[in-house]
Image (spheres, helix red, strand yellow):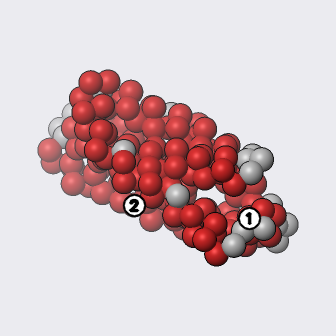
């Protein structure tokens, strides 16, 4: 057992698992912000539903090309591209002038989610030594659960000030690890 190799593989897996964390923070943050979005943009029920579900459009589309993209660009570059999309989408949803912009950035977040959901576990499995592969791949799932909990906590904290923009901006923070 080569301890330095295990450590670097574990560190790589942990960084890749940020894709899972970012995925769910971008999805879940809308649950705390939707009441404030509804008031600010005077949304009817259909607009509320689309604002909540718009990210799933990208989530559905991205897995169709995530595997081939990661084969062409490499897993690391694809994860880096997903991180850039996460950051751009987080800031775009934090600073929209209208709901069309907001929904466009939510769809972009969905594309990042779709990329990360395919490539993060794939990359982790590829860099992990066989004896600890299962533990390292499970980091991605653990990151998803922690991301959901964090997103709800951030939404709760900013709900007191009705600062929905900060809720979405906080989703950009994990991308700094890329």
Q: Secondary structure at mark 1?
A: helix
Query: Is residue 7 in sight in this rendering?
Result: no
Viewport quadrant of the N terminus = top left
Q: Position of residue 138 (x, y in %)?
A: 30, 57
Determine the residue positioned at 27% across, 24% down. Answer: 72
Q: Position of residue 120 (x, y in %)?
A: 34, 44
Quadrant of the image occupied by residue 122: top left
Location of mark 2 (residue): 142
Q: Position of residue 12 (x, y in %)?
A: 37, 37
Location of mark 1 (residue): 37
Residue extending furthest toward the right? 161
Disc 1 from disc 2: Cα separation: 30 Å
Q: Nearer the viewer, residue 49 or 4?
A: 49
Determine the residue positioned at 81% across, 64% down. Answer: 40
Query: Is residue 75 in sight in this rendering?
Result: yes
Q: Is residue 137 left or right of residue 173?
A: left
Q: Are marks 1 and 2 in contact (CB under 8 Å)?
A: no
Q: Considering only order in the chain, which callout, 2 or 1, is on the residue closer to the N terminus?
A: 1
In the image, residue 165 above or below residue 90: below
Label 2, residues with CA under 10 Å away: few <14, some 14-19, many ≥20: some
In the image, residue 81 above or below residue 125: above
Q: Secondary structure at mark 2?
A: helix
Residue extending furthest toward the top? 73
Q: Is residue 1 left or right of residue 21?
A: left
Q: Position of residue 150 (x, y in %)?
A: 58, 63
In the image, residue 12 above or below residue 56: above
Q: Is residue 125 left or right of residue 83?
A: left
Q: Which disc number belongs to residue 95?
A: none
Determine the residue positioned at 30% across, 26% down. Answer: 74
Q: How many numbered marks, from 0 up? A: 2
Label 1, residues with CA under 10 Å away: few <14, some 14-19, many ≥20: many
């Amino acid at each position: 057992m080569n301890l330095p190799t295990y450590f670097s593989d574990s560190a790589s897996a942990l960084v890749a698992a940020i894709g899972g964390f970012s995925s769910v923070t971008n999805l879940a943050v809308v649950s705390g912000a939707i009441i404030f979005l509804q008031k600010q943009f005077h949304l009817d029920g259909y607009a509320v539903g689309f604002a909540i579900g718009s990210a799933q459009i990208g989530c559905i589309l991205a897995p169709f090309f995530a595997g081939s993209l990661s084969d062409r660009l490499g897993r690391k570059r694809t994860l880096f591209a997903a991180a850039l999309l996460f950051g751009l989408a987080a800031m775009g949803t934090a600073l929209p002038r209208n709901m069309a912009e907001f929904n466009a950035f939510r769809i972009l977040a969905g594309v990042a989610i779709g990329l990360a959901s395919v490539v993060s576990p794939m990359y982790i499995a590829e860099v992990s030594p066989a004896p600890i592969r299962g533990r390292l791949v499970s980091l991605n799932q653990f990151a998803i659960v922690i991301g959901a909990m964090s997103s709800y906590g951030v939404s709760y904290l900013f709900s007191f000030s009705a600062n929905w923009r900060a809720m979405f901006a906080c989703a950009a923070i994990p991308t700094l690890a890329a």
